[in-house]
Structure formats: structure tokens, C-alpha cells
Amino acid sequence: MSRRRTERVAASVLRDDTSQIRLPRTLRAGLRFGDADPLGCVLAALARVGLDDPEQLRRRYASPGRPLVCRVVPNATWAADAASTPDDTLLHQALLLGLCTPYQYDPARPVLWTRASLTRCVELHDAEGFYA
């Protein structure tokens, strides 16, 4: 009869900075809206800066020009409070969130603002050169 051995392995290339195999974090994006309507807050900020289309934010704010890997961070303590954040910071965060799915940041996709995308807190990781 063969012997059995059970070993639990818990590791992540997204969290461990000491590992030789890792995906470095490029940046974070996240907003907290409390009880306010996320879409209403962001559209109001867009109007206050004199813009009427989220796509115009691409020319206003610098954002990564290549696809990145997204990791959703539930209950992120670092997310900015939308009520007290200046419009420029709020819209830059909203631009990044609008270019993200739960798994990927894609600068080629249209800026899509939904309640789900605006309330998601993400860390963006650079997968360039990653080989496991």
C-alpha cells in the first residue's frame, strides 16, 4: 500500500514581494461612495470639469498604455472617499476603473462606467516578462 501525504500550499504571485516569481504592482484604483449613487457622483464630477464624455478623460489623465492584470481587493482601506476627493482625483480613478474588468485593465476598450466597475477596488499588475 502506498503512503499518502497531504500538504496545503498557499501562495500568490500577486502578493509576495520576496518570491522570485512575481507580478509587480503598477498601481491601485478604488473609490468609496457610501450610500451615494456611484454613477451619479462620477457623472456630476465630469460635468463640473466641463466634459460630457468619459472618453475625453483619456486626453486629460495619464494612464498605462498596455494591458495589465487586475486583482480585485475587497474592502480596500486605501480606496478614496468620493465625497471628499477632488474632482481630478475622482475622475482619474474613475477612468482607470472604467478601463478594467475584474481580471484585466485594457486601454483599448471603451471607458465603461457601471455601478459594479466604479465600486470595484483593484490593484493593477504588470505581467510583462512573466514566465513561470
Image: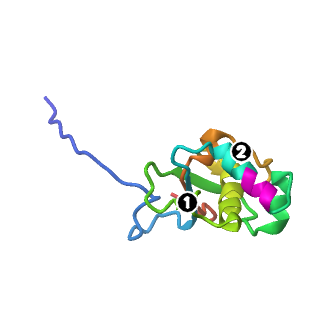
Please state the horizontal and vertical placement of residue 69, each as a whole percent of the image: 60, 54
Task: Characterize the magenta stretch by its predominant secondary structure.
Answer: helix
Report the side of 103 relative to 77 (left or right).
right
| Residue 99 appears in view | no
Q: Quadrant of residue 66?
A: bottom right
Left or right position of 50 against 16? right
Q: Residues within 10 Å of mark 1 (few under 14, many from 20)?
A: few
Instruction: Read off the residue under disc 1.
Output: 131
Q: Measuring 75% from the left and 69% from the top, which residue is drawn there?
A: 62
Position in image of residue 19 (x %, y %): 40, 67
Q: Nearer the viewer, residue 21 or 61?
A: 61
Q: Residue furthest top?
A: 1
Secondary structure of the residue carrying numbered label 2: loop
Q: Which residues are magenta?
A: 44-48
Left-right relation of 11 to 127: left
Instruction: Name the residue beneath numbered marker 2.
Output: 113
Q: Can you say whether 82 is above or below 89 in the image?
A: above
User: Residue at the location (86% across, 52% down)?
Assistant: 52
Q: Position of residue 58 (x, y in %)?
A: 81, 61
| SS label for mark 1 | loop
Distance between mark 1 and mark 2 Cα atoms: 33 Å
Q: Is residue 47 magenta?
A: yes
Q: Please, is residue 91 above or below residue 4 in the view?
A: below
The N terminus - image quarter: top left
- Identify residue type, mark 2: Trp
At label 1, the amino acid type is Tyr
Q: Is residue 62 left or right of residue 51?
A: left
Q: Viewer-proximal residue, 100 or 115? A: 115
